[in-house]
Every structure is written in structure tokens, then in C-alpha cells.
Amino acid sequence: MLAFLIERLLQSAVVMLAVALIAFTLFNYVGDPIENMVGQDTTIAERQQLRHELGLDDSVVVQFARFVADAACGDFGISYQQQRPVGQIILERLPATFELSFVAVAMAIALGVPMGIYTGIHRHSWLSHGLMGLSLVGVSLPTFLVGILLILVFSVDLGWLPSFGRGTVVHIGWWSTGLLTLDGWRAIIMPATTLALFQMTLIMRLVRAEMTEVLRTDYIKFARARGLSNRAIHFGHALKNSLVPVITITGLQLGSVIAFAIITETVFQWPGMGLMFIQAVSFVDIPVMAAYLMLVGGFFVVVNLVVDLLNHVIDPRLRVDRVRVGIG
Amino acid sequence: MTEPLLRVENLRVELPGRRGVVTAIDDVSFAVAPGEVLGIVGESGAGKSLTGAAIIGLLEPPLHLVGGRIAFAGRRIDNLPGEAMRRIRGRQIGMIFQDPLTSLNPLYTIGRQLIETIRTHLDLAPASARERALALLHEVGIAGAERRLYQYPHQFSGGMRQRIVIALAIAANPRLIIADEPTTALDVSIQAQIIALLQRLSRNSGAAVVLISHDMGLIAETAHRVAVMYAGRVVEIGPVREIISHPRHPYTRGLMNAIPRIGGGRDRLCQIEGAMPRLGEIPAGCPFGPRCAEASDACRRWRPQLLPAAGTDAACWLYARMPAPTGEVVNG
Amino acid sequence: MSSIRDCGLTACGWALADLVAPAAAGRPGALLRRIFDSDLWWSFRRSPVTVAAAIVAFVLIASSLLAPWIAPHDPFNLASLNLLDAEHPPAWLAGGSWRFPLGTDQEGRDMLSAILYGSRLSLLVGFPAVLVSMVLGVTLGLVAGWRGGLIDTVIMRVADVELSFPAILVALLIDGVARGVLPRGIHNEIASYVVIAAIALSFWVHYARTVRASTLVERDKEYIQAARVIGVRPAKILFGHLLPNVIGPVLVVATINLALAILTEATLSFLGVGLPPTRPSLGTLIRNGNDYLMSGDWWISLFPGAALAALILSVNLLGDWLRDAFNPKLR
């Protein structure tokens, strides 16, 4: 177990370095950092001075090392657009994205898994067919369209929910949360639903497919032959066996939550990291883009690691057995 | 004569498909006495496994039972609602499948699977259930049961897994065990052990066994009576000694001839010409007709029922004492 | 994201090769007959949903490609725009007219025409993007599987790292880099090419992986060994012998990816980093309309949205059917 953990940690470190390298290349070589920081009437001599002070004439390796060290401490440079430390901007925006993603994922799992189980067990009921049809729509509708539709119905027509912003926000330390106010909840429902929809349909289809496969296996047939109750078979045996690939794929899909958060935040003007990133791309604000890249990369690495560990715990076949496989 | 434990009468199972309805099991009848071992033998596709599945009520849709009746201990079981049939499964009738590798849930310890089965049918506290699980493992010949309870299926070899499967099937002491090709997936050396185990368990508990196999040798050594299936029907049924030494039905005769004997003085293997028809293409009249050297006109036109044939019952017009439907007397 | 099931490898390849052979031999009539006779066509006709999807897809695609000829107005001709026509609702509502059947936007542009041209652009970006990613991915996959060793490792490591990021993010990144590197004016001009490149560079991975896996399997088969022994040049082996046998699943992935490509382009445009407002695709139109949602001009974003949804949905359904038709397990 320990060997496994160490090996995976090393792998993760390598991937992180690769991501950092890309971010660094972006940072230094796309456009000129100096040009973006100074006014037009700064002389060439002054620019050279600045370049030297910032260490931009050191060797690539040194610069990269400094870049990584800085990043590890949370120093991502100064935003071109906002002229203040990127780290600060990120701290401001992180809670918004985190809460949105968290609520969305919780929704997706809480609704997707039961729906998947139901449609997996009762394959041919009209409800199942209906849900499957809706799921196809859910997979095909672009996220921003869903957001726009929701805004049309609930904001424009009915006026129940706000179409932008986080509502009233409570500050605890450096964190700001919208989940402690009714206002905040009203503001988060539509964006979270929009974000959750794609995930939900994906999870539902996945769970259904896995359940169907599992319910066809020999050990389920044998379980039935032993007279186990439907409840024991569906929720005891079938579910556990279905969950292994579901957990893996859902975990890996967390990445798309990040991507879709960008879109959702744009539609609802949600002041999170996604919106920040888009604005940075429009403005070509390289430090912000690089920082976002590193953070997201780090996030993925951690998620992949957790998923691997979870799998290892749940599926005993993946544990390397020191004891010799049974004798005769 | 004692009341048979299991009586199957005129069983008929159909499979609706893309190109119409196909009859998978056609008018199959047999009975199993308490404590008896009945072998069902036949080629792949003859309907043996389906018969076993039908008895225990596990036909997979769209296969379904359309005719006949199945009675267990005098009670009719083919038309029971789901929950009632579930209570019979495992408790009264147990079933073993072919592949021990896939019969056990890989994610649960065998102890958990055993205890779960025991507690489903017998009202025992966890501690007593555990005791029984240990006793079962011991009975099927797994050493070190105490330790083994906490292990996973992939930590056992094929033969041991099949023993665990048997332990699971007899956990609630069923009176009938259906064994569907229980040794086909195992090494030859292990096969003998597993069969010996089944025989011992049957004798000790008095349970009857329906042993389904394509291996005639296995049946010969294990069964008391044999039913030979062909194209979804029973073509011959009788005591195993008789079937082996004096097969009456031409198909059974062909099967027996095809078994090579040491010192038999033959230099070529005997085959039955042709192949068993597929389910949708069974000819009218006797299904074996096209391949039978002794087929007559009656065989092509009318389907024979099981007729007494001096020692066994054979579905063949050769043994009709009564006039065949045309009016002529066939073979006195 | 499509479901992650592979279809039988050689089965697909043979089925397709079988179908295409007569055309390749120069007898297109025979090809048509074989298409209508085949299993594919039969399973197609049996599913009314797929037939409907095919019809819708066909109508949408045809009408958008013919936009320059069938659109009632030219929404890009600034001279023909009249601000008095601005923000007209659709024809069946009060204030609308049949001159502008689906209404107009804030500058007086006819929505129907804009949608037709917009769909055209979406397709003109989507198709090439899929094509480029397919060519790129298949080639890299073939090379990786064939050569093995360092090339293989490098290509696969890159693929792995890229795969752990969602495609949208990769596309955004590439787009952002392009913006940073190219001066603003030029970027607008070649925006569609940038988007094609961005999408292609995010999607090639799917093909590369599948093709590499198939190549590894086929590489050791006898017909390939035989070709090598005879002395056929590697390039010819790769593209002449190996490719037809691994192409099956690739085509299925391509159909699914088409819907994804259209969706990705629309998303990029909606976010403001795709096609510019001067030559808008459906995504850009929706972005534009978003600003007018609260003031009640819902048609400016909803109709392009509906067109986009219809397009993606029908292509998705077609892709689903193709996958099921090629899957030998389901027959």
C-alpha cells in the first residue's frame, strides 16, 4: 500500500512539473511581460533595468526554478489587467467557484445515481424511457443554452430568481460564502443546476450502463438462484460492483466541472475563477492565465490521486496480495 | 412407489425472436425421486441448461414458460408469484452453475456471502450463522476455514471456488440440487473430487440431484437415471445401466457408439452423420429423423412420444406397439 | 461526452471496407445498391428516431451550406441594414412582419438569415476541425503504435497529460495563446482557422489512442509480417494495409466528435473567444442575444439556440445509431 502511494505521488509530481513548464512557457514567452507592465514612454534603458530587476535575463532553468518556487508560495505575479497580485485575485474568486462546483457536483450525484439505479433495474418502464430521452437532450444541449433557458424562465418570465451575481455574501476570514443566506441560495440554484445538468445525465447513463452489465453477470444469477431478495441483490451486490467504474469516471469528470464552470460563470456573471480566466483570455492577461493553469492542473492531479486510492480501497483485486493465491 | 420429489410434465418454453417464435423446450417430462441422481445429457443447444433454469424459475426474458407444469413435493411451482418462488430458491431447490470463476461476487469475502445466504433462509443470529458457515466450509473440504472466511474469491483456486459455490448452494439444506455442468470448467483431476463431493453430500442429506452435463462418462458414474435430450426434447429416459448397455433410441445408440473404447478393435471413430438442428429449424415429425438410419415414413410425419421400450422409455416409432397413426402396425 | 465503449475493431473495418470496395473499384452504382442492401440500412430504417434525426440533420446542414443563395437577406452587408428595423419580434407576434420571419437583432439584421449563415459557419468550422483532428490523431497513433520506443512514449505521455484536461480548457488555452501571439487585427481575420486549430489540437488524442491500440494488435499479425518480409515500404504498409483495418472505430468516434466540435466552437464563440461578431457563428449570435435577454428580446438568442440544439442533437443521434450498428455485441 505504501509503495503504491509513493509511486503515485511521484507520478503526480512529474505531471505537475510538466504543467508548470507549460505555464512558465506561457508566462515568459507569449507576449513580452515587460511590454505589458510599463507605459509607452518608458525608455529602453529603464526597460532593461526592469528586466534585470525582475530576473528576466537569467538563464531559463533559473527562471523556471524561481517560477516554481514562487508558485509554491502562492506568488503568481502581477495581473496585467488589474495591476495587482494574481494571488489576491484568486483568493477573492476561489470561494465562489468552489461553492458553485460543490453544490453542482452534490446535485449531480444525489440525482444522477438514484436515477441511474432506477433506469438500470427497471429498464423498460415508461419512466425509464422518458428519463433516457431527457438524458440525451441533456448531453446534447450546450451548457450555456441551458443557462439561458433557465434565465428566460425563472428570471425574465417569472422573476423568482436573480440572473447574475451571488446574492448576499457572508465573509468568514478570507472566505466568502453565499450559502448562509437565503439570498445566496436563490442566486446559486440556477447556476448550480446548469452546471450539474451535464454531469447528472452522464452519471445517470453511466450508472445505468454499469448496473445493466452487472445484473447480467453469473454471480448475480447465482445470487438469485440462492434466493437472495431483490433488495439484497440490487443494493447489496449489483450496486457495489457498479460503483467502481462509476467512481473512476466521475472523478475524472470533475475536470469537466471546472471547464463548464467557466461557461456557467460567464452566463450568470458569477464572480468566480472561471469568469476571471475568460476575462484574462480576452485581455491576454498572461499571469492570470498561467496561474489558473497551474491551479487547475494541481486540482486534477489531486483528484486523479484520490480516485486511484479510492479504487484501491474498494476493489480488493487491485491490492497486491502478499499471500500466495490459494492452494489446490 | 414413493411420490416423486420433482415432477416435470409437458414443459414447454418459447423464445420470441426477430423472426418469429421459437420453441426451446418442447413437451419435456420427467420425474426425480427423493435422494435420486437424475442425469440430463445432450449436446450443446439441446436445452439441458434451459430445463434446469425453468425448474428453478430463472428463465431469462424473453424466454418464458408457455405450457406444462412443474410440481415440487406435490406443490405446483411453475406458476408461483415472484416472492413465493424466491423463498423456494436456495431453501428447497439449490442450483450450481458451470463457471466458478464468475459465480462468486469478487468484491465480497466468501464469509460474507455465506452468512448472507444462511441468514436469508434460516433464522439465525450472526454468531450462529458464522458457525454454520464454518461447518459448511468444512463439509465441502476447505481446510483452514477460520482464516478463509475473510478471504476473497480471487484468492482461491478454481476447484476450491467450486467447493465454495457448492457450500453456498446447500447452505439452507435444499432437498433438490440442480447442477448445471458443475465440472466442465475444472481440471480433470479436480472434476473427480467435486463429483465425489456432490455424491457424498447427496447421500448424507438425502437431497436429490439433477446433474446436467454433456459428458456421458460423468453421468454414467454418478447418476441413477438418465434423460437424453435432443433438440429441446427428451428422446430417451431410463436407468443408467440400461441406457449405457442397451440404448434403445437411435440417437442414444449413436452417442454410445461414438465413445471410443480401449481394445474395441475399431480403427475409425464412429460419428453420427449431420448435426443437431438449430432451434428455429427443427423438422416436423421426429427431430432426429433426418440423421437416423432407421427412419421411416412415420418418423418424418409424426412426432413420437416417449414409449416404453423394454427397460427404458424412448421417443421413437420403432417401439410403438400400438398402430402408428397411419394404421399400419410398426414393429411388434 | 460520448459513452466509452469501443466497437469491434475489425468488424467495423471490414463492414466499411466491404461497402466501399465497389466504389473504390470505380462502380458507384454497385456501391449504392450495396448500401441499401446492407445491415446498416436495415437497422437504420427500423429506428424512426434515427430516421427523423437524419432528416433534420440533412435539412439543417443543406440549408446552412446553401445560405448564401437561400437566405432572404444578407446580414453582413452593412449598407442594407436599417436601424428602424431593429429589435422586431418574430412574424407571428405583434410588431413583427413576414419580411423578418424570426425577428431582427439590435442592429436590424434578419435573424433567419443570421441563423442560416451562422449555422454555415459553425459547420465550416466543425467539419474541418474534425477532419484535421482525425488526420492528425490517426497519423500520430499509427506512428506511435508502429515505431514504439521513444516516439511512442513521448506521444502517449503528451496525450495523457492533455487528456487529463477537459477539451474546452485546452481549446481555450490554445486560443488564448494565439491571441497573445498574433496582433489583434490579424486574429479577427483568421479567427475561424484559429478555432479549427484549437479544436483539432484538443481532439486528436481520442483518435491517437484508439488507433495506437489497434496498431499494436495488428502489427504482429501475419499479413503485416508478410508485407514487411516482401519489402513493402513502411509508409505503404501503414497507410495501405494497416489503416483500413483500424479505421472502423475511428469513423464512429469522428461522427460523435462532430457534434462535440460544433458544441465546442459554439461554446468558444459564446465565451467571446471564438468567431468574432463581424462573421458570427451560432455561438456568437447567442452571445450577442444574451445582452438583450433581460429587456425582453428573447428571440435574438433563443432561435439561434434552438438551431444549435437541433443540429447537435441530430448529429448525436446519428452517432449513437452508427455506434450501435457497428457493435457486433448488440446484434
Image: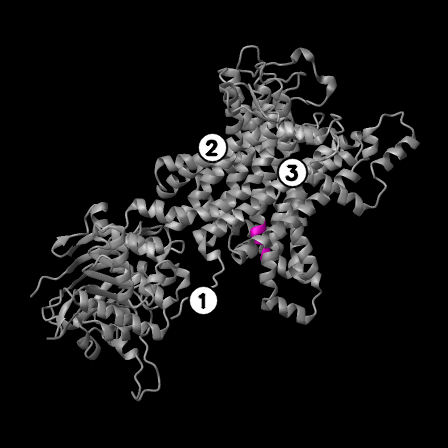
Which residue occupies 18% across, 67% down? B204
Rendered view: A143 above or below B54? above
Quarter of the image where the C terminus of chain B is located: bottom left
Residue indicated by mark 1: A324
Farthest residue, direction left: B1
| Depth order, front residue of C253/B294 | C253
Q: Mark 3 highlights which residue?
A: A295
Which of labels 2 and 3 is toward the front?
Answer: 3
In front: C278, or B151?
B151
Find the magenta span and give its range: C245-250
Chain holding disc 1: A
Discs 3 and 1 share one subunit: yes
Mark 3 to mark 1 CA distance (whole Å): 43 Å
Q: Is residue B160 magenta?
A: no
* Residue in the image at 72% along x and 43% along y: A22
Is C249 a magenta residue? Answer: yes
- Left/right placement of residue C209 relative to residue C80 reads left
Residue type, mark 3 in image: Leu
Q: Is residue B41 left or right of residue A158?
A: left
Q: Which residue is mark 2?
A: A107
Marks 2 and 1, the one that precedes in the sequence: 2
Please check whether the numbered discs 2 and 1 fall on a single chain.
yes
Kindly state the secondary structure of the residue where label 2 is placed. Answer: helix
Residue B114 as seen in the image, left or right of residue C315: left
Mark 2–mark 1 CB contact (< 8 Å): no
**Mark 1 nearby-residue class (10 Å; few <14, some 14–19, many ≥20):** few
